[in-house]
């Protein structure tokens, strides 16, 4: 039975090229094998990792990615990566988009340098993450990412100091006084460069509880990112305590 759009002549040519047809099926099988292999790699790294297919849909999402952004695999697998991350650069321009530069470069066989971008975690918390990209033309793409929010905070503080804009400590800041003792402890750990996982371990609490503390701190201080909260802590002498 001929399928729509195929003529008898087309069918004859295909029947006369059985080897080529087998090769096409083999290529499809190989692509599936490569996709499965790359997806399995995501489970063997401590960094956040996810895999996208050639349509930029997420097909694998590891536990570290879930821990970093607070989003489970079941919530993102099948969605396009730019819909999940919505990454932007420091000027607010979109980095994540359909046919984003990182994806296009991989498909063209170019080497992709790591880059930082701003993403939004669960609860609206804004974070800096550093992205690495691995892949080959015509195949799936593996993205690795890690939270570098505190690194950006320290860099920001150094820039403020060099530019002479760093104010003397204001230890009686109303914003800081609104924090509970536990929240001040969490903010102090943030200022020392610890991430959610390290804070949870240091305070013997769950990652979810640590993440909730950070969310409350940002809300009380009126800051959008951990970097801004850490900068405020340093300006008020908390980071040095």
Image (cartoon, rainbow, N blue to C red):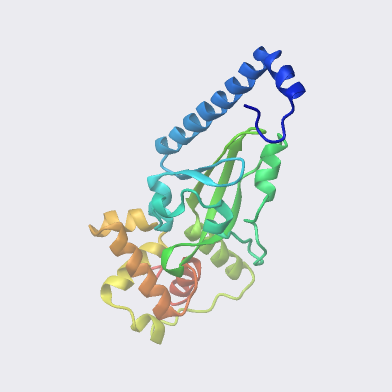
The picture places residue 27, in percent across and down from the top left corner, at 61, 23
> Which residue is at 31% across, 72% downward?
183
Q: Residue furthest front?
A: 1
> Which residue is at 47% across, 36% downward?
39
Q: Is residue 117 shown to the viewer in this render?
A: yes
The picture places residue 139, in percent across and down from the top left corner, at 61, 34
> Which residue is at 34% across, 54% downward?
198
Q: Return the residue nearer the eye: 142 or 219.
A: 142
Q: Return the residue nearer the eye: 221 or 59.
A: 59
Which image quarter: residue 200? bottom left
Left or right of 177, for residue 77: right
The N terminus sits in image quarter: top right
The picture places residue 101, in percent across and down from the top left corner, at 69, 49
Q: Return the residue nearer the eye: 111 or 1.
A: 1
The C terminus sits in image quarter: bottom left
Q: Is residue 241 shown to the viewer in this render?
A: no
The total number of labels drawn is: 0
The picture places residue 175, in percent across and down from the top left corner, at 40, 83
Q: Is residue 109 above or below residue 154?
A: above
Q: Return the residue nearer the eye: 71 or 59.
A: 59
Q: Is residue 152 above or below residue 13?
A: below
> Which residue is at 65% across, 32% downward?
3
Q: Is residue 96 above or below residue 1?
A: below
Q: Residue furthest left?
A: 204
Q: Is residue 158 above or below residue 31?
A: below
């Amino acid at each position: 039975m001929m399928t729509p759009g195929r003529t008898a002549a087309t069918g004859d040519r295909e029947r006369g090229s059985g080897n080529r047809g087998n090769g096409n099926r083999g290529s499809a099988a190989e692509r599936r094998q490569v996709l499965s292999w790359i997806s399995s790699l995501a489970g063997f790294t401590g960094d956040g990792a996810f895999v996208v297919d050639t349509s930029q849909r997420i097909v694998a999402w590891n536990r570290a990615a879930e821990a970093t952004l607070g989003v489970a695999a079941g919530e993102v697998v099948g969605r396009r990566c730019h819909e999940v991350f919505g990454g932007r650069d420091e000027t607010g321009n979109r980095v994540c988009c359909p046919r984003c530069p990182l994806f296009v470069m991989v498909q063209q066989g170019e080497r992709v340098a790591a880059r930082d971008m701003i993403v939004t975690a669960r609860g609206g918390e804004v974070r800096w993450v550093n992205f690495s990209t691995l892949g080959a033309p015509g195949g799936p793409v593996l993205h690795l990412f890690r939270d570098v929010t505190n690194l950006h905070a320290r860099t920001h503080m150094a820039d403020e100091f060099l530019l002479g804009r760093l104010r003397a400590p204001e230890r009686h800041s109303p914003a800081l006084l609104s924090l509970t003792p536990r929240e001040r402890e969490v903010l102090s750990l943030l200022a020392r460069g610890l991430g959610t996982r390290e804070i949870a371990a240091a305070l013997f609490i769950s990652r979810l509880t640590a993440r909730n503390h950070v969310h409350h701190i940002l809300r009380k201080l009126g800051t959008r990112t951990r970097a801004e909260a850490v900068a405020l802590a340093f300006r008020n002498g908390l980071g040095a305590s």
